[in-house]
Amino acid sequence: MKLAPAKFVLAIAATCLGWPLLAQENPSSATSTPAQTITIHAKKYEFIPAEITLKKDQTVKLELTSDDVAHSLEIPALGVNSVMKKGKLTDVDVTPTKAGDFKGKCGKFCGFGHEKMHFLVHVVN
């Protein structure tokens, strides 16, 4: 985030004096703050949990991680395509705009059981 010189000085002064910054640079980002966080683990040859339920128009943070080798979570209908590295968290914010059931899968070949790695997202009103 790039601040104008006056805002920069004010931000430094507020930080030093312990004042909270009341204004945000992008007020619309406050409306998309995730209401919930769901952690999803991948390991040969499954996702844990294998299905989740989300609410339409509600932003949720998915914390993705792998317990063994590199995987990925692809949910094309929700615009999710993210690599899952062993022992590292990858955050993905998702805001479903349509109700229904959406299929996901592992998008990175991870062994002979790779084709069994399915994921399901239920989006409700």
Image (cartoon, helix red, strand yellow):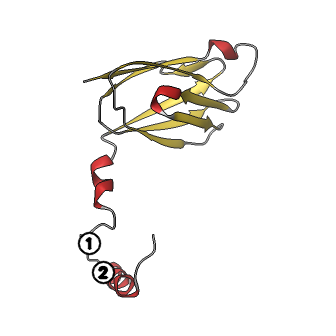
Q: Amino acid at mark 2?
A: Ala
Cβ–Cβ under 8 Å for marks 2 and 1:
yes
The kind of secondary structure element at disc 1 is loop
Percent x, y of residue 92: 48, 41
Quickly name the residue at label 2: 14
Say which residue appears at 33% left-offset and 26% top-offset: 98
Q: Give the farthest residue toward the right.
A: 112
Indicate left or right for 110 with 121 as reference: right
How many marks are shown on the rendered structure? Answer: 2
Percent x, y of residue 61: 41, 40
Q: Which numbered dot is residue 61?
A: none
Q: Within 10 angstroms of label 1, few (less than 14), some, or many (20 or more) residues?
A: few
Indicate whether 59 appears above or below 4: above
Percent x, y of residue 60: 37, 37
Percent x, y of residue 70: 69, 33
Sequence-wise first label, 2 or 1:
2
Residue 90 or 67: which is nearer the viewer?
A: 90
Quickly name the residue at label 1: 20
Q: Quadrant of the N terminus?
A: bottom left
Q: Amino acid at mark 1?
A: Pro
